[in-house]
Image (tube, rainbow, N blue to C red):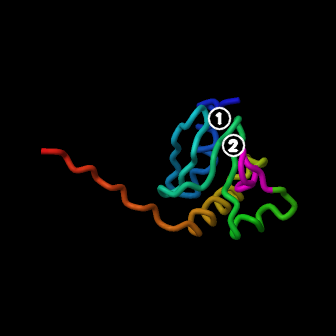
Amino acid sequence: MASTPDFMQFVEEQLREAGAISHYKMMGDYVVYCDLKVVGAVCGNQFYIKRLPVSEPFFPNATPVAPTGGKDTHFLVENLEDTAFLAQLVRAVCDALPPPKPKKRKEKAT
């Protein structure tokens, strides 16, 4: 099931205290960015955060999941109402990720 634009907008609003939040639509779902770093995904109208050593303490009893199949690389974030918790979680994940690689410019053929 694809995610709705309204749900993605709701998630963005809930995460606004974490930093510059943006998203990219991909095959009906969304990749979620914080300060240009991929921090999670919205799939099937559910928000998933990357599983990193800094995110594991936020989910002490949770089982990692694979939102789109494959490896268990994310945690399902069920409480989207606690904006302070969300900001702290997303900020921790964002700060733990390396800076984004600069995009390569294509040279024009002459």
Query: Where is mark 2, residue-wise?
Result: 68
Disc 1 marks a residue whose amino acid type is Phe
Badge 2 marks a residue whose secondary structure is: loop
Residue 89 on the magenta span = no
Query: Where is mark 1, residue-wise?
Result: 7
Residue projecting furthest to the right: 61
What residue lies at 70% left-to-right and 36% top-to-bottom? 45
Residue 98, relative to residue 45: is it above or below? below
What residue lies at 47% left-to-right and 66% top-to-bottom? 99
Disc 2 marks a residue whose amino acid type is Thr
Front residue (pair 14, 109):
109
Residue projecting furthest to the front: 110
Taking 61 as reference, is 75 left or right? left
Q: Report which quarter residue 88 is drawn in.
A: bottom right
Give the extent of the magenta segment: 64-76
What residue lies at 63% left-to-right and 59% top-to-bottom? 90
Front residue (pair 53, 35):
53
Taking 57 as reference, is 88 left or right? left
Badge 1 marks a residue whose secondary structure is: helix
Q: Position of residue 23 (x, y in %)?
A: 53, 44
Q: Position of residue 98 (x, y in %)?
A: 51, 68
Residue 73 on the magenta span = yes
Mark 2 is surrounded, within 10 Å at the Cα level, by few (under 14), some (14 to 19) or many (20 or more) other residues, namely: few
Measured Cα–Cα span from mark 2 to mark 1:
18 Å
Q: Position of residue 38 (x, y in %)?
A: 55, 54
